Image: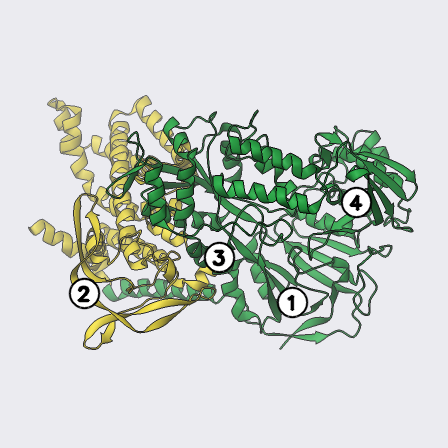
């Protein structure tokens, strides 16, 4: 309990914001009024439409397309659809497992509530952002975990063994670091055939991101391991014959955990940006599955930006998440320095 | 600390917002008005092209920038009327067709000069055909259009201004084919004889060496920057083209083609008054339409374009795809069900901004002479599609479709990444087909890779693609004849694989050798009926043709087949832009 308390005290507001993001993306099915692929071809690029009070209840007006060229809509006179709360709406499988249809709020067709506006195919941007954040979060967290696993193992192996093994692992790591990561990612993605399912693409992206990201960490872990190797308590443990694996887990790793936690929080945003970059280039998760990158990619032409500037919100979400992660990393790394600043 | 952190986030976000807002209002805010010019001769026309020309040799040019530029520099014996698609004289004065269409005698306009002052006569015509277009050692893409059943047309000189064309069989599109560029014998003959023609008139050639008969001559080419064309003072306009009032043709003294990196920069340059003519895509209408008045331009909408977009299935038994999938694709009812599932109205409203129309068949509506108007269009009727699928032996488990052998219907749809419109159409198609239980996986590929997969390895299932429409159905021969290389669903067949393909082969052979227009129409009507029933290509939608025209230009008329410029030599600059 005290540990969690201290984590919150050290993480502060950035941690709370991130937890908020995380929770809302986990609960995307419930919080989003629509599925990520629920289209309304007649409401392409409809701007945000919030519920308002109409004859004593919350409701949204029914809109219809008036001018497809300029994406203008007009109200169908006299037609309002009430907003229901904790209601049954479009059915879903929560995290792909549990079936359900309960939503925080829903509006029956032909009405359409749009918290942030709709995209080209009339899909709800708010719903897609929630699903997209989930995808980006889960993907980058699993990629970070995988890359840390590789990085820590490689670093420990190189740092504690030394000699030719050290040379081999470190030079290999340098090769990876020398290639610009986006090109490396695109190269890895291009090895696999096109036409894979969303799950397969997700696994490949996770693997690719981890594969590209391990080297920097391995290098630092190696350095830390080399210095810890010479510490008295390690020498003592070795002199009484502690096995190498136990030496790693009991004596070396715990002593670098402070660094690892900070490195973890600071590298997640890198992975989020990497994922977004791949999806933006069309190499990421295939449509209609949303990720922050491919929602942003929808707004890359001048006409799209003009017709639906709200699509840029996904870019702002990326920036926001990255900033919050960095703030969290800063706080965890150096809590005293942060506290001293008025 | 908290306020500080929030401040930085807020600052960054607001910065982004401002940037975003700047992006969306990025269209020009300059207001222009048109000040008339005192003398309308000697103006200039500025346009953008999105790539460098590859060659200045008309026989070797195939990509659009080269052909556009060379269209101003060279002429053929005939030209196509932009108003109705009929054949009109260009370098020719007139012609006479005899022997049931097997002989055409062409008389040249007297007094024609090349742009270097040398007179043009029949020897240039004979040279162009015999030494260039029919020369097997020259890599020209035009040759296939000039062959009648694989054999060249015999070209002979009767007198300096009369050329006789003879074919072994009547060939209906012959007059249209005579529109190929005539090239100067006095310059190119030594080059052809020395075997260097394939490298001649490259983009590195000195502009003054490129000699033509067109209204303009090449003045300067700066790679990656611009191409400048100057008025050809020795130009003699074709019969039937009268000058715009107050100037001798060509009225313009200069055409400037700026090379820009992409369509968006071209759009911005048009909005900011830097160019005079701009081919508008329907998506760009949302940006351009509100700016018409301030930008001093008008948007001319000319009805459906000739370009086709369609989906097609791999029906090729030689392809390495799963045998059960091939069975679906070769099933006519399955294809018909797909045709009924497509919501073309949504495609028009979403992909084409409401500016387009569904394609009824292989002949564009604009080509009145051959369009078969008796065929009912395919609408959006998922219920009918489901019934058809059940009739075709498919069944539903829940909302998912399975075939008779128990395979779930999942299809990989290829399209090319270069076209965002096609990817959007594919996404609508994906949602439409999901409604009838078919799962589509979209794979956008780069064009070259796509072409390899479709045309040589045959490793594909479903394709969303487009082709440029043609004025004479004979131009579609490579798509529809079973031996054609663009016969996408089963390319280069040794023998027609299905009965209806054999009938289409026969119809195209007949169509090429029948001279009577009524009879030809009947032949191609029958072809359209078969195409409509068998659906090897399931047609989607075509955008409206829209051109943005600066109000400083004159001699501009909307034509159904040839854009807004009926003839470039009639265009003049009536005014200049000035800030309002």
Q: CA distance from mark 1 to mark 3?
A: 23 Å
On residue B550, which mark appears? Answer: 1
Colour chain A is painted in: yellow
**Dot 2 lies on which element?**
strand
User: Between disc 3 and disc 4, whose residue precedes?
Assistant: 4
Q: CA distance from mark 3 to mark 2?
A: 35 Å
The image shows residue B43 at horizontal and vertical percentages of 76, 65
Q: In the picture shown, does residue A107 fall above or below B52?
A: below
Disc 4 packing (10 Å; few <14; some 14–19; many ≥20): few
The image shows residue A18 at horizontal and vertical percentages of 22, 55
Q: What residue sits right under mark 3 in the picture?
A: B352
Q: What residue sits right under mark 4 in the picture?
A: B206
User: Between disc 1 and disc 3, whose residue precedes?
Assistant: 3
Q: Residue at x 46, y 66 (%)?
A: A70
Q: CA distance from mark 2 to mark 4?
A: 74 Å
Identify the chain of the residue marked 2, using the numbered disc in the image: A
The quadrant in which residue B171 appears is top right
On residue B67, which mark appears? Answer: none
Q: CA distance from mark 3 to mark 4?
A: 43 Å
Q: Is residue A41 left or right of residue B571?
A: left
Disc 3 packing (10 Å; few <14; some 14–19; many ≥20): many
Q: Are marks 2 and 4 in contact (CB under 8 Å)?
A: no
Q: CA distance from mark 1 to mark 2?
A: 52 Å
Q: Residue at x 41, y 37 (%)?
A: A184
Q: Are marks 1 and 2 in contact (CB under 8 Å)?
A: no
Marks 4 and 1 on same chain: yes
Colour chain B is painted in: green
Q: CA distance from mark 4 to mark 1?
A: 32 Å
């Amino acid at each position: 309990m005290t540990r969690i308390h201290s984590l919150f005290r050290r993480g502060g507001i950035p941690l709370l914001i991130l937890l908020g993001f995380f929770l809302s993306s986990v609960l995307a099915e419930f919080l989003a009024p629509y599925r990520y692929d629920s289209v309304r071809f007649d409401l392409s690029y409809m701007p945000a439409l919030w519920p308002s009070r109409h004859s004593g209840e919350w409701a949204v007006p029914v809109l219809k397309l008036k001018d497809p060229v300029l994406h203008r809509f007009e109200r169908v006179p006299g037609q309002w659809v009430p907003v229901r709360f904790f209601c049954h709406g479009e059915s879903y499988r929560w995290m792909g497992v549990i079936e359900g249809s309960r939503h925080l709020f829903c509006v029956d067709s032909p009405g359409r509530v749009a918290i942030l506006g709709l995209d080209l195919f009339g899909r709800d941007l708010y719903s897609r952002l929630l699903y997209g954040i989930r995808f980006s979060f889960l993907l980058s967290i699993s990629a970070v975990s995988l890359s840390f696993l590789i990085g820590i193992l490689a670093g420990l192996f190189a740092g504690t063994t030394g000699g030719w093994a050290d040379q081999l692992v470190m030079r290999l790591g340098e090769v990876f670091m020398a290639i610009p990561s986006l090109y490396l990612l695109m190269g890895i993605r291009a090895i696999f055939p096109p036409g894979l399912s969303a799950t397969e693409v997700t696994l490949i992206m996770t693997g690719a991101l981890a594969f590209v990201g391990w080297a920097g960490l391995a290098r630092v872990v190696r350095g830390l391991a080399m210095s810890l190797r010479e510490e008295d308590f390690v020498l003592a443990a070795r002199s009484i014959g502690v096995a190498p694996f136990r030496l790693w887990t009991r004596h070396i790793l715990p002593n670098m955990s402070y660094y690892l936690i900070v490195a973890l929080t600071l590298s997640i945003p890198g992975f989020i940006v990497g994922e977004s970059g791949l999806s933006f280039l069309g190499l990421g998760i295939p449509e209609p599955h949303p990720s922050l990158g491919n929602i942003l990619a929808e707004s890359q032409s001048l006409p799209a930006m003009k017709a639906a500037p709200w699509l840029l919100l996904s870019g702002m979400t990326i920036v926001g998440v990255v900033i919050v992660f960095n703030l969290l990393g800063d706080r965890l790394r150096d809590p005293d320095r942060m506290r001293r600043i008025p | 600390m908290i306020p500080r952190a929030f401040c930085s986030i807020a600052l960054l976000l607001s910065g982004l917002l401002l940037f975003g807002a700047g992006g969306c209002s990025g269209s020009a805010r300059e207001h222009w008005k048109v000040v008339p010019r005192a003398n309308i001769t000697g103006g200039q026309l500025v346009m953008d092209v999105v790539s460098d020309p590859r060659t200045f040799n008309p026989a070797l040019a195939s990509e659009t920038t080269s052909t556009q530029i060379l269209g101003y520099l060279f002429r053929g014996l005939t030209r196509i009327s932009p108003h109705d698609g009929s054949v009109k004289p260009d370098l020719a004065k007139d012609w006479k067709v005899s022997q049931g269409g097997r002989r055409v005698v062409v008389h040249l306009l007297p007094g024609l000069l090349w742009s270097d002052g040398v007179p043009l006569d029949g020897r240039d015509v004979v040279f162009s055909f015999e030494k260039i277009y029919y020369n097997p050692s020259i890599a020209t893409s035009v040759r296939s259009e000039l062959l009648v059943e694989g054999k060249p047309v015999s070209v002979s000189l009767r007198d300096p201004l009369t050329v006789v064309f003879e074919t072994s069989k009547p060939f209906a599109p012959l007059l249209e084919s005579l529109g190929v560029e005539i090239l100067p014998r006095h310059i190119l003959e030594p080059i052809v004889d020395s075997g260097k023609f394939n490298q001649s008139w490259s983009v590195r050639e000195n502009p003054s060496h490129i000699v033509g008969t067109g209204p303009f001559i090449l003045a300067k080419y700066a790679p990656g920057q611009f191409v400048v064309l100057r008025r050809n003072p020795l130009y003699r306009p074709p019969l039937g083209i009268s000058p715009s009032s107050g100037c001798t043709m060509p009225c313009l003294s200069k055409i400037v083609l700026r090379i820009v990196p992409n369509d968006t920069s071209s759009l911005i340059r048009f909005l900011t008054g830097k160019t005079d003519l701009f081919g508008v895509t329907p998506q760009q209408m949302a940006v351009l339409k509100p700016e018409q008045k301030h930008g001093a331009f008008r948007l001319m909408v000319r009805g459906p374009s000739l370009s086709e977009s369609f989906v097609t299935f791999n029906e090729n038994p030689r392809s390495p795809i799963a045998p059960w999938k091939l069975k679906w694709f070769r099933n006519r009812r399955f294809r018909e069900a797909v045709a009924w599932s497509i919501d073309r109205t949504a495609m028009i409203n979403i992909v084409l901004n409401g500016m387009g129309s569904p394609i009824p068949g292989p002949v564009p509506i604009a080509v009145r002479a051959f369009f078969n108007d008796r065929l009912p269009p395919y609408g959006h009727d998922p219920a009918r599609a489901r019934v058809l699928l059940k009739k075709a032996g498919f069944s539903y488990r829940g909302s998912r479709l399975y075939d008779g052998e128990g395979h779930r219907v999942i299809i990989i749809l290829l399209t090319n990444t270069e076209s965002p419109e096609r990817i959007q159409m594919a996404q609508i198609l994906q949602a439409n087909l999901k409604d009838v239980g078919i799962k589509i996986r979209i794979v956008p590929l780069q064009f070259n890779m796509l072409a390899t997969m479709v045309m040589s390895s045959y490793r594909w299932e479903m394709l969303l693609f487009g082709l440029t429409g043609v004025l004479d159905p004979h131009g579609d021969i490579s798509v529809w004849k079973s031996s054609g290389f663009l016969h996408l669903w089963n390319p280069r067949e040794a023998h027609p694989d299905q009965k209806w393909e054999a009938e289409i082969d026969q119809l195209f052979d007949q169509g090429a050798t029948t001279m009577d227009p009524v009879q030809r129409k009947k032949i191609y009507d029958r072809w359209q009926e078969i195409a409509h029933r068998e659906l090897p290509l399931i047609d989607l939608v075509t955008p409206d043709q829209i051109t943005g025209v600066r109000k400083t230009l004159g001699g501009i008329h909307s034509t159904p087949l040839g854009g807004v410029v009926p003839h470039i030599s009639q265009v003049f600059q009536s005014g200049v832009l000035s800030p309002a």
